[in-house]
Image (cartoon, rainbow, N blue to C red):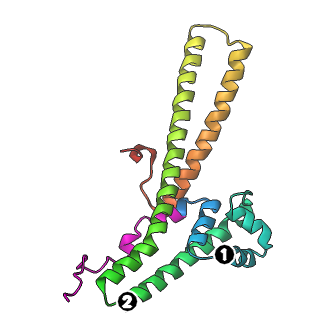
Amino acid sequence: MPETMSVLTDPPPPLDVSLAEMPRALALATSPQLLTLLRILGTGPSVVADTLAVSRTPVSLWMAGKRAVPKKYAAAISAMAQEAFSVAQAQTHSVLSTLESVDHQWAFLAAFLAPLALWVQEVVYEQHQMVRGLLACCEHVAEQAESYKAHLHAGQQLTGERRAELALSCQAMISTLKGFAQLVAVTQSQGADNTPETIGR
């Protein structure tokens, strides 16, 4: 009986190559997204609750997306997710080194990478959608500003309704600038090129 031919003759690439986008996703992810990652990595509500010194009930609701995660736990959840990923990566590397068959190595790596790849894709896609939304808001505010300028240059007075629109536009502009400031802070902290000009290229 002939031996089964190996479909993949080369061993899989190092984990740091396969998960090159992971550091950026970890930096961009929200607390609910990081809790999803913890679940993927096998960290249950009990462990999260013990680490955060809270009861399991709210953590279960957070991880199920049924209750908002308080901001005060954001840093701790981020640290937990990064630590859990580091441990999982080390364990996977250890197991891979014990598998002699290249096919088994690829199969094991695929099982480890598949849910993580989906998670990274969702995080990055959502962030890109946020950038597009911010850019659309900026364009809208800029159009309104040009309209107001035209009225003022023509010596026309703004009506009460136009003043209210201007106030709302200013508020939208402030919110937009805050959103951009948060994105810039994140991208600068990780050294990633995620500026609005590069999105959608």
Distance from disc 2 to disc 1, alpha carbons, whole Å, reads 27 Å
Q: Tell me the element at label 1.
A: loop
The three-letter code of the residue at mark 1 reads Gly
The reply to whether discs 2 and 1 touch (Cβ–Cβ < 8 Å) is no
**Earlier residue among tags 2 and 1:** 1
Residue designated by label 2: 97
Q: Which mark is residue 175?
A: none
Query: Magenta stretch mostly in which secondary structure?
Result: loop
Residue found 37% across the figure and 77% down from its top: 107
Residue designated by label 1: 44
Q: Nearer the viewer, residue 165 or 130?
A: 130
Q: Measured from the top left, where is residue 97 in percent x and y?
A: 37, 89
Q: Nearer the viewer, residue 193 or 123?
A: 123
Q: Tell me the element at label 2.
A: helix
Question: Which residue range is magenta in the image?
Answer: 1-26
Residue 82 occupies quadrant: bottom right
Residue found 24% across the figure and 83% down from its top: 4
Q: Measured from the top left, where is residue 171 in percent x and y?
A: 67, 34
Instruction: Residue at the far front: name it.
Output: 1
Dot 2, how many residues are within 10 Å of its Cα: few (below 14), some (14-19), or many (20+)?
few
Say if the magenta span includes residue 46.
Answer: no
Quadrant (top left, top right, bottom left, bottom right) of the N terminus: bottom left
Q: Measured from the top left, where is residue 121 in percent x and y?
A: 46, 58
Q: Measured from the top left, where is residue 74 in percent x and y?
A: 67, 64
Q: Nearer the viewer, residue 199 or 99?
A: 99
Residue 14 occupies quadrant: bottom left
The three-letter code of the residue at mark 2 reads Ser
Residue found 53% across the figure and 23% down from its top: 143
Quadrant (top left, top right, bottom left, bottom right) of the C terminus: top left
Task: Please say if 138 is above or below 119.
Answer: above
Residue found 68% across the figure and 64% down from its top: 63
Say if the magenta span includes residue 11.
Answer: yes
